[in-house]
Image (tube, helix red, strand yellow):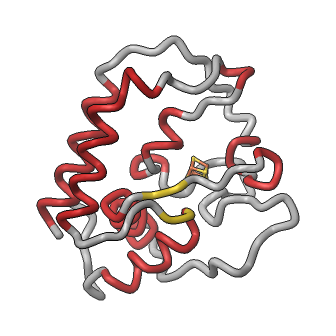
């Protein structure tokens, strides 16, 4: 599990090193899945990292069934901030809204996507799952006293 988490974080670092002209103003519409019509799909490693970030924030669980009317992400705080910003999934780093400049083209990050898929396989995952379900399962999988790093 540790190697998987380290590889996912390495993927996120590598993504940050690829300049993309985007201008996110934190409108948070992309974090309200009923507005966007799409729920982020997480591979197993992404879900583990997100779950660790949530745990590090002192939270123990999420309820995948407790959806807000606008389908807000369970990590979206009332303040409009992402509760796991440093550990947010790959899609949250690449799927910018149109106002921010749009999604980063898949061909520019396909190698990183493949690495996340390889991590998923190493965890015996069965492919990407919707964010709430993926993270709820990952939280169950984490050791009870899992640290941040
Ligand atoms: S993980 Fe964070 S950035 Fe991604 S949808 Fe949820 S609140 Fe938004």
Q: Residue furthest right?
A: 69
Q: Position of residue 23 (x, y in %)?
A: 61, 18
Between 113 and 11, the residue placed more toward the observer is 113
In this picture, is 75 found above or below 59?
Answer: above
Taking the image as shown, residue 134 lies to the left or right of residue 126, namely right
In which image quadrant can residue 19 be found?
top left
Q: Position of residue 53 (x, y in %)?
A: 40, 62
In this picture, is 26 found above or below 53?
Answer: above
Q: Position of residue 85 (x, y in %)?
A: 48, 48
Residue shown at 36%/28% (left/top)? Answer: 109
Residue shown at 53%/42% (left/top)? Answer: 92
Between 50 and 103, the residue placed more toward the observer is 103
Between 22 and 43, the residue placed more toward the observer is 43
In this picture, is 14 found above or below 101?
Answer: below
Residue shown at 25%/84% (left/top)? Answer: 143
In which image quadrant can residue 12 be found?
top left
In this picture, is 7 found above or below 23?
Answer: below
Quadrant (top left, top right, bottom left, bottom right) of the N terminus: bottom left
Q: Position of residue 50 (x, y in %)?
A: 42, 61
Number of numbered markers: 0
Q: Residue furthest left?
A: 3
Taking the image as shown, residue 96 lies to the left or right of residue 18, namely right
Residue shown at 39%/59% (left/top)? Answer: 43
Quadrant (top left, top right, bottom left, bottom right) of the C terminus: bottom left
In which image quadrant can residue 147 be found?
bottom left
């Amino acid at each position: 599990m540790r190697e998987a988490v380290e590889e996912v974080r390495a993927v996120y670092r590598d993504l940050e090193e690829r300049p993309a002209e985007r201008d996110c103003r934190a409108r948070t519409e992309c974090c309200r899945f009923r507005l966007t019509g799409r729920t982020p799909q997480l591979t197993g490693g992404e879900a583990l990292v997100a779950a660790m970030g949530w745990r590090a924030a002192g939270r123990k669980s999420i309820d995948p069934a407790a959806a807000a009317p606008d389908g807000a992400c369970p990590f979206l705080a009332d303040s409009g901030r992402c509760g796991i910003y440093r550990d947010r999934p790959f899609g949250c780093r690449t799927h910018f809204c149109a106002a921010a400049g749009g999604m980063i083209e898949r061909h520019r990050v396909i190698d990183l996507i493949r690495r996340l898929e390889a991590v998923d396989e190493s965890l015996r995952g069965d492919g990407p799952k919707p964010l709430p379900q993926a993270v709820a399962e990952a939280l169950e999988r984490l050791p009870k006293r899992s640290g941040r790093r």
